Amino acid sequence: MPVTIDELVNYVAGRALDTVVDSRDRHDPVVKLASPAELQQLFAQAAPLDLKADDVPDNAALIAAVDLVIDRSVHTRHPRFFNQNFAGADPVAIVGDWLAASLNTTLATYEMAPVFTLMENAVLSRLAELVGYRSATNSANQLESPAGVMCPGGSTANMMALQLARHRKRPDSIRTGTGGERLTIFTSASGHYSTSKAAAVLGLGTEAVVKVPDGPDGSMDAVALRNAVEASKAAGQVPFAIVATAGTTVTGAFDDLDALADVAEEFDLWLHVDACFGGAALFSPRIHHLLDGVDRTDSFVWNPHKMMGLTQQCTLFVVSEPERLDACFSSKADYLFQPDKLNAELDSGDRTFLCARRVDALKIWLTWKARGDSGFTERTNHALDLADYTRAAIANSDGRFVVVAPGPYVNVVFRWLPPVLRNTTSSIDDLSPQLRQALHDVAPGIKARMQTEGTAMVGYQPIHGLNAFRLLFMNPEVTTDDVDETLRLIDAYGEHEWADR
């Protein structure tokens, strides 16, 4: 008997639910690695990946393809997945995402999303409260100006912040453009690349972004920032924005927001905080001080899909003066944002350059309600505990590993060292070019062995020109045993890689 559409839907839903409620066993592979050609061949035996005009629907084949999708995907809920700054999606968030998708509406207007509009405003208001921004309410205790908007990713939020900053400096720019003057943006050398991309999209050009040197801890040097702003002004340019980073992608460094706010106030610059990664510090008394001064900033973005396990994507963008969103982005399209319709004042689509927006409000509202601030605190502190444990294990590794960036957050950045470099007084900087290159090449070799065997996934990246590993603690199911086993695997693979060189 042929498989019906209803049977296909029920099967897919059942398999998906299985992935939510059943944690990945530690002995299962993180990924069953296959080359593109091998994947093409596997799917050709079920349902070919290519779409053709003469395809005949075959739901039985699609069931086999769904099994392949699950079997051959990376399992980010696996307790030995440390590869990205997201992992271990919260089951509550996943089912909330499903429910929102099943209702299939948009957050552009209140009439299309009455419940979700109120949920989004409530979530944004709570974040603004945590950050220290004001929230304007009327006599009915309803927000007059929602504290911000939800965005499809931190890069979008960063671009919106820069548009707001330009609009404050040059209000006519949304109508006439920026003319011939050179507007400049300042961010740290370790800041996210989305700042440069946003400058390109906004027509400012990537050369408008001034990369300020980092201090020893990887955060922006406030003295260097002031000097850079003064140099820009002396060159006849118009500084207008600072993009601070709370939790850099690689080392987890936090810029000194109070020091940056002093510079911003002195030169009348918009201060935006890219806390996509580090916003979780709001929930942990242990590291909350890393965000001291955040209440003095102009805008703030946080990605709960990182530390809090929300499904991709979930981005909250809040503004200290949220009424600026209307002034900057409103187009007053009269086919959609009619001022004389019911509840027109609650339409959010005219407060962003996006129109249709995916309903991400339900999953974050549902998860926040189910877990509470205390649940977010517990999740953050668990990650911090694991990071501290890992740093201690590295310190007691008899020289097998060495921490590269001893940061305060959930990133542990380190190198594996071959026996010839252990417990010596020699510096990495003293290595011969040949030895340095061999050490640089060993990290991708170790990772390739891990991927091939599916035992773990760990990221690596160059630090000062030499590859280093990065363990990121996001998944609440990770234990100290997982840390120990992952370090053991890196050491074992490293021994093999070094012996082959």
Image (cartoon, rainbow, N blue to C red):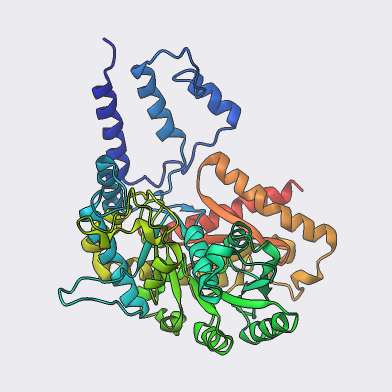
Q: Is residue 452 above or below residue 290?
A: above
For this orientation, the residue located farthest to the left is 140
Question: Does residue 345 lie above or below 355 as drawn?
Answer: below
Nearer the observer, 199 or 286? 199
Residue in front for this viewpoint, 42 or 60: 60
User: In the figure, 25 relative to 393: above or below?
Assistant: above
Residue 297 lies, in percent from the top left, at 46, 80
Image position, residue 295 (x, y; %): 41, 82
**Residue situated furthest top in the rendering:** 1
Is residue 477 something that shows in the picture?
Answer: no
Number of numbered discs: 0
Q: Is residue 41 above or below residue 197?
A: above
Q: Residue 98's spot in the image, x, y percent?
A: 28, 44
Tell me if 384 is positioned left or right of 212 in this view. Answer: left
Please tell me which residue is depicted at 68% across the width and 62% down the height of the picture: 206
Instruction: Give coordinates of residue 231: x percent, y percent.
Output: 73, 83
Q: Quadrant of the N terminus?
A: top left
Residue positioned 47% across, 62% down in the render: 157
Question: Is residue 191 visible in the rendered structure shown here?
Answer: yes
What residue do we see at 73% from left, 72% from top?
Answer: 424
**Front residue of 287 and 468:** 287
